[in-house]
Structure formats: C-alpha cells, structure tokens
Image (cartoon, rainbow, N blue to C red):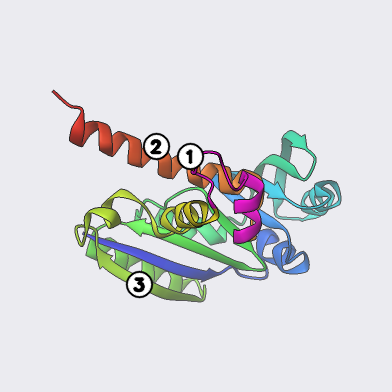
Amino acid sequence: MPHAKLTIDIPAHTWIGELSRQHPATVFQVVTGTPGDDVGIGLVRLVASDPLPIITEIQARETVERLELLWKHDDEALLQVETTNPLPLLPVWRAGVPLEMPFDIQDGRATWEVTTSQSRLSALRTQLEDLGIGFTIDHVREIDASQADRLLTDRQRAVLREAVEAGYYRTPREATLGDVADRLGVANSTASDVLHRAEDHVIHWFAEEHMSG
C-alpha cells in the first residue's frame, strides 16, 4: 500500500486560497473537514500576529455561509467554517482517500500526506486534474519500506529530529519548545502538536514491542 506526499496549489478563487496568498505569513491549519449536503464544514486553526482582521475578511467572503469563532488566544484562533465552495478538499472526498490531518495551508500551498490503495491514489490524481488543482507528487513509497516509515510521517520525523538536535530531550533541557518552533519556522502550538503525535506513536510502539505480555 503506497504512502504519498503531495504539494497542493490551493486555487486562488477559493476563500482560503485567496486569503492565504494575501497574508503569506499566516498559517491556516485545517484540523478536520467534512462534506455536508450543500456545504463543506471545516475546523481551521488560524495562526497570525493579529487574527481578528483576517477573521473579518473570511466572514466577508461570499462563499462562506457561516463562521463561528470557537476560541481565540493571542496569535491563534480556532474557527468552524461552512463554505459553499470546499474545492480544496473535494478531490479527497470524491476519491475516497483518507487525508492525514491536520495539514497547513500557507501562501496558497498545502502539503498532503495520504496512505491508501494504488487505485484510490490514481483516482485522487484524476480528481485533482479534473478540478484544475495544481499539484506535485513529492514521493510515493510503500509503507512497509522500513519500520521508521510505518511509525512516523515525514513531518513528524523532521520535527522530532529538530527537537533532538536542539537538545529538547536532554537533561537538563538545552532548548525550549519555542526554540524548536523557531528552528522550524512554525508556531509553538504547531510544533507542540506534531511532537505530541510523534511521541504518542513512539511510546505506543515501544509498549507494544517491549512491554506486552
């Protein structure tokens, strides 16, 4: 079963494609998304120096039917957005491909990681092409290529590697979470979320391999 990593060009005529290009330093993290009868519904974490003006811009878009601010703290906000044009996620919904969440959209581009059958991966490619969504395939590999590939995603490995090299796991610690985030050029919350997911996978793998029975 192949694991694929793709870079997606979010169409500029979608609200998230347009605004992410207008605010290239802002991170739109898609936490989850589901199709509705007439709209797409998604949870989006917004990371910006001042989220409020961007939230106002989102509300002003014609394709945004409803926006709810679930919480806001300093440079972050969590939004529930209902849109009549959920074009960026239509290809995965139509192809029946499970997309790894969350994923970030920044400056009009997103990185997707999927693990699915070869036939569904081909269907995803066809859907992207049919909808006119630009993309590049960064890599495709079999998920049993190595134990490390099965255990962690590329992004989780990269963040974990930065944390280790920075001294985040040394005793006493030689780097803070903020230091790791700065090395990666991401928000503290993003670094924390990815690290926690990686740690969870590693700990559960260790427990199953060495502590079972």
| Vertical comparison of 142 with 56: above or below | below
Q: Residue at point 61% right, 70% down? A: 11
* Left or right of 126, for residue 158: right
The residue pinned by badge 3 equals 139
Q: Residues within 10 Å of mark 3 (few under 14, many from 20)?
A: few
Residue lying farthest top? 213
Instruction: Tell me the mark number nearer the camera, choosing from 2 and 3.
Output: 2
The residue pinned by badge 2 equals 200
Q: Residue at point 64% right, 68% down? A: 108
* Left or right of 121, for residue 128: right
Q: CA distance from mark 2 to mark 3?
A: 25 Å
Q: Quadrant location of residue 148?
A: bottom left
Whether the residues at callouts 2 and 1 have beta carbons within 8 Å, the answer is yes
Please name the amino acid that badge 1 sits on.
His
Q: Residues within 10 Å of mark 1 (few under 14, many from 20)?
A: some
Please name the amino acid that badge 2 sits on.
Asp
What percent of the width, then of the height, locates residue 14?
A: 66, 63
Q: CA distance from mark 2 to mark 1?
A: 6 Å
Please name the amino acid that badge 3 sits on.
His
Which segment is the magenta one? Answer: 167-184
What percent of the width, then of the height, locates residue 101?
A: 47, 48
Q: Residues within 10 Å of mark 2 (few under 14, many from 20)?
A: few
- Magenta-span inclusion, residue 29: no
| Vertical comparison of 101 with 137: above or below | above
Taking the image as drawn, is residue 39 in sight? no
Q: Which mark is first along the chain, 3 or 2?
A: 3
Q: CA distance from mark 3 to mark 1?
A: 25 Å
Of the 4 image quadrants, the one containing the C terminus is: top left
Q: Is 61 or 144 nearer to us in this picture?
A: 144
| Vertical comparison of 8 with 177: above or below | below
Q: Quadrant location of residue 192?
A: top right
The residue pinned by badge 1 equals 196
